[in-house]
Image (cartoon, grey):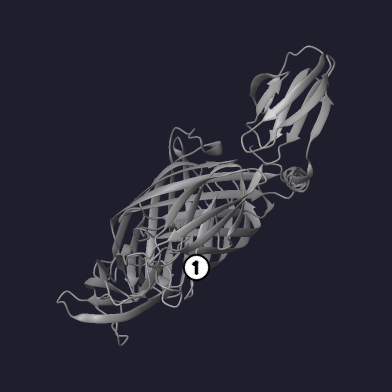
């Protein structure tokens, strides 16, 4: 059994958080022999009696008894020296904090000759140094060569390299020039989308960068070249810009499926008498009513209903993350006790027909630590369910490792499996599913049985604009010669809300199991994000 003791870990973590920042220097003699030198930060050069020996943490097992001078050096930090006595009867452990050497840099940003006055073009500079961005012109920086990046909207960016001296106030003067008007990095969030999806899931967003003040317009044209939607953009006051489109015309009428051309037009607002500069980007976007984005259960490492996978996947580029918690009498293949298992999951589609799902399950028992498990699935969709063709079919390849037993409370079967999820769309918003699968399993997920088990699951899925709901059931058949044994029978009812305008997902679950004359019931809650 692979159980992680929870209480000791929590206690140790708590005291580490409280004590570590205040530890400082320490010199300690413990049982053993030799010398140990540590530093914060590590990787400092260690000199013993003037001879360089290595980098911290440095361990010297055999060192004669006596007095030694120890010196630590690290670039950007003050040197540390200490004298110690090493004994043959003990092990000496030294930990020293190194003080970072700092200097002060003042950055003065001005306008180059011929630049527009403040009333024509504002100059609000940002200075980026050592990963920190600030508008304050005074920096406290580590000693040494540092790269300073200065930028301001509407002005050309400049990069300067300076040497910062210890305890010395240094000044850097930079003169910026007005930036030429440009538009770069034009992109859209969804090249194919369905306006029937709720909230932000039914929109696509056009994004681009602008270098200087201006304004613009988004124009959507149909395949005949007719303008069906326009939106004014700007005024531009910073670099990143974006505009969303929900697949409707200017008067709010839903547009039909098809390919549309998006034109992003941007025009400068000149500060002098020159002619305004125009820049444009052209992109193609498709409205497709078959692209459905909605949440599914994935806590078992395979997306679908709670106990039955579905041949449904997210569109390419979309993803779903979830956290779920169960409470009640949950089961593993070994025992059943009161616990609070939880799962963290990720579901994403890198390709049009491929979806990847991964899940981490942890079952913490109140009386004996925690049992972890991990699992994942690659699902390839052969046939997508559509209104005109209601049958959906996919192939799933899964593997899971379990800390103990052969099944987790979230229905993750330990081992490798092949599944064939099928779905039949009975009517709009209602689908039936069945998923036969073969499972090579064993304790802790290592395939040990010569004959694979058969899993049979199925259920019903209800899908509306702002929620999905489902009922699912799974049974397991174990072949032992001519006899057939039955694994746990599991059932669940679930509902998932994803109300606009956010992309949050809220879940409720109720389930139960039965095996060998024993049974139990539990509930669950979850929260996630879908995009």
In the rendered image, residue 510, in percent from the top left (x then y), is placed at 58, 64
Left or right: where 50 falls relative to 134:
right
In the rendered image, residue 146, in percent from the top left (x then y), is placed at 53, 45
Q: Nearer the viewer, residue 183 or 143?
A: 143
Q: Quadrant of the C terminus?
A: bottom left
The residue shown at (72%, 20%) is 48
Q: Quadrant of the N terminus?
A: top right
Secondary structure beneath label 1: loop
In the rendered image, residue 132, in percent from the top left (x then y), is placed at 56, 54
The residue shown at (75%, 43%) is 20
In the rendered image, residue 497, in percent from the top left (x then y), is placed at 50, 71
Left or right: where 520 falls relative to 414:
right
Residue at the bottom extreme? 251
In this view, 89 is above or below 494:
above
The residue shown at (48%, 63%) is 110
Q: Nearer the viewer, residue 207 or 48?
A: 48
Q: Nearer the viewer, residue 485 or 101?
A: 101
Give the quadrant of residue 239.
Answer: bottom left
Question: In this rendering, does residue 200 appear at all?
Answer: yes
Residue beneath disc 1: 124
Give the quadrant of residue 289.
Answer: bottom left
């Amino acid at each position: 059994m692979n159980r992680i003791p929870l209480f000791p870990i929590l206690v140790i973590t708590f005291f580490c958080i409280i004590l570590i920042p205040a530890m400082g220097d320490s010199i300690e003699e413990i049982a053993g022999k030799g010398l140990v030198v540590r530093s914060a930060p590590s990787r400092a050069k260690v000199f013993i009696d003037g001879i360089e020996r290595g980098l911290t943490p440095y361990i010297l097992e055999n060192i004669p008894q006596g007095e030694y001078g120890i010196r630590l050096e690290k670039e950007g930090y003050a040197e540390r020296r200490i004298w110690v006595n090493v004994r043959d009867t003990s092990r000496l452990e030294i930990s020293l904090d190194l003080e970072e050497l700092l200097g002060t840099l003042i950055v003065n940003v001005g306008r180059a000759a011929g630049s527009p006055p403040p009333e024509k073009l504002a100059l609000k500079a940002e200075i980026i140094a050592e990963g920190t961005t600030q508008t304050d012109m005074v920096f406290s920086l580590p000693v040494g060569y540092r790269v300073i990046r200065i930028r301001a909207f509407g002005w050309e960016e400049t990069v300067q390299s300076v040497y910062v001296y210890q305890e010395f106030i240094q000044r850097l003067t930079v003169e910026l020039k007005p930036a030429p008007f440009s538009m770069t990095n034009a992109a859209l969030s969804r090249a194919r989308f369905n306006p029937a999806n709720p909230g932000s899931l039914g929109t696509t967003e056009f994004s681009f960068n602008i270098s200087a003040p201006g304004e613009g317009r988004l124009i959507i044209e149909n395949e005949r070249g007719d303008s069906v939607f326009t939106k004014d953009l700007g005024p531009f006051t910073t670099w990143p810009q974006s505009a969303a489109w929900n697949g409707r015309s200017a008067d709010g009428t839903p547009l039909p499926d098809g390919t549309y051309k998006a034109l992003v037009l941007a025009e400068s607002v000149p500060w002098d008498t020159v002619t305004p500069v125009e820049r444009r980007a052209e992109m193609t976007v498709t409205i497709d009513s078959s692209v459905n984005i909605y949440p599914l259960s994935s806590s078992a490492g395979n997306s679908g209903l709670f106990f039955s996978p579905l041949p449904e996947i997210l569109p390419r580029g979309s993803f779903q993350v979830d956290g779920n918690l169960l409470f009640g009498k949950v089961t593993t293949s070994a025992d059943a006790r009161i616990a609070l298992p939880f799962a963290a999951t990720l579901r994403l589609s890198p390709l049009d027909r491929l979806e990847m799902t991964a899940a981490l399950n942890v079952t913490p028992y109140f009386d004996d630590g925690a049992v972890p498990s991990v699992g994942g699935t690659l699902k390839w969709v052969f046939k997508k369910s559509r209104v005109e063709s209601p049958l959906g079919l996919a192939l799933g390849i899964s593997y899971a490792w379990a800390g103990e037993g052969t099944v987790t409370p979230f229905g993750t079967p330990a081992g490798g499996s092949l599944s064939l999820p099928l779905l039949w769309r009975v009517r709009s918003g209602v689908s039936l599913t069945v998923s036969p699968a073969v499972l090579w399993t064993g304790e802790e997920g290592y395939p040990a049985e010569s004959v694979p088990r058969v899993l049979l699951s199925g259920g019903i899925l209800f899908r509306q604009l702002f929620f999905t709901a489902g009922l699912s059931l799974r049974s397991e058949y174990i072949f032992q010669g001519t006899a057939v044994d039955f694994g746990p029978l599991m059932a669940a009812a679930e509902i998932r809300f994803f109300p606009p305008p956010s992309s949050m997902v809220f879940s409720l679950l109720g389930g139960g199991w039965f095996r060998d004359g024993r049974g139990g019931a539990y509930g669950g809650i979850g929260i996630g994000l879908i995009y």
